[in-house]
Amino acid sequence: MALRRRLLGLLFAALLVALCGLSVAAYQKVFTSRVTVLLRTDHVGNQLQAESDVKLLGVLVGEVRAIRSHGDGAEVELGLRPDQVGRIPANVSARLLPKTLFGERFVSLELPDDPVGALDEGAVIAQDRTSGAIELERVLGDLLPTLQAVRPDKLSSALTSMAQALDGRGATLGRTIVELDAHLRELNPHLPALQEDISRFADVTDVYADAGPDLVRALKDATAVSRTIAEQRANLDTVYTSLTTASADLTGFLRGNGETVVALADRARPTVELLATYSPEFPCVLDAVNAIRPRMDRVLGKGTDQPGLHAEVTVVPPGEKYVPGRDDPVHRRGGGPHCPAGPVNAVTPDQVPEWAGLLMGDRTGGGR
């Protein structure tokens, strides 16, 4: 009897071990038939583990059996359900996507635009290298350091607040996204012009950056001018008051004599034009007068011990009346402005009349 009980105990223990083994094997799907295919990728990351899901269009079609790495990438062994393999084309590709921001990754099978055939045992699947997949990988890679730096409690609070803010506003959010999409569609054709404007704006900012010191000095000078104006405010008020009075007086004068001023200007026009015509002679005449001035001072006795020149002028009526044409002055050298002799110092004796020679100090003329 003791031996029998011992044998029954051993049999019961073996049965328990067998049941545990069968449970583990069933959990590991040892008895489940799978079609094994191989996925080759350049990296898998830390979030992809054995037993991770394999999905096609969001439907579970298998799981990851094993992950092996080699020098230039990694190989992922996939176990696909036999009833689902027939729906997967042979030229399918795969992406490694996260379930959530912090969740593990899974293998997402991507259908090609032109499906060919169907997967079978031992097939090799390539990683999706389209532009969309590469951009998604870059976004996830850039987002991971940020998520690692964020404190989980703070992120949870922010996500909870966002969820509460969006709760019940799905329709409004959808309309907003649709309107945003319409605006972006209208904006896209104008992106080259916008880019050119931004480039030109950068050029303008460069110009202002180069002119920055000059602008600062100008503002500093303007500050000094403003300070001076503030200090001279009382004087400026006086000037403004005087200008107001003068403006009022000038306005009254012009209102009362405007027509007279206009008529005078019109009548003075020929005289002004004549002066303008002969204006080239003015420097010559003034130089001659300036040269004669010291000699006239000596003739009049200034600075000498001799008596100066005295003259008595008597105006008498003319012997005959003025007859136009007969008594007109004669211009021997022709009309127009000219200065034939230059300054007085350059005048030769034969060009000087007798009365001018007397004024210039030549008293050889006696009593003439």
Image: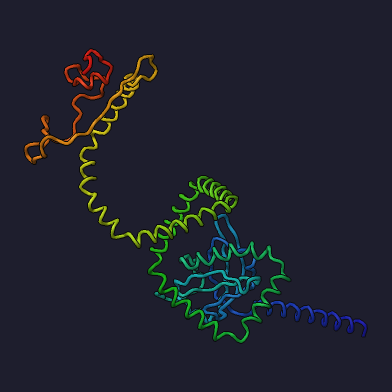
Q: Position of residue 16 (x, y in %)?
A: 79, 81
Tell whether 167 sits left or right of 363: right
Q: Is residue 189 left or right of residue 163?
A: left
User: Who is closer to the viewer here, 129 or 208?
Assistant: 208
> Count the marks: how many?
0
* Residue closest to the eye, 219 or 243: 243
Q: Is residue 32 above or below residue 258?
A: below
Residue for point 39% across, 61% down: 252
Nearer-the-camera pick, 230 or 216: 230
x and y percentages locating residue 365 in the rendered image: 21, 15
Image quadrant occupied by the N terminus: bottom right
Q: Is residue 180 visible?
A: yes
Q: Give the vertical position of 334 relative to 147 (above or below).
A: above
Farthest residue to the left: give it.
326
Could you say where residue 107 lies in the image, as x and y percent from the top left?
56, 72
Going by the picture, which residue comes out furthest to the top? 364
Q: Nearer the viewer, residue 345 or 28?
A: 345
Residue found at x 51% / y 47%: 218
The image quadrant that residue 163 belongs to is bottom right
Q: Residue at x 66, y 81 (%)?
A: 164
Q: Position of residue 133 (x, y in %)?
A: 50, 67
Q: Quadrant of the C terminus?
A: top left
In this rendering, would 79 be left or right of 25?
left
Q: Is residue 150 left or right of residue 328?
A: right
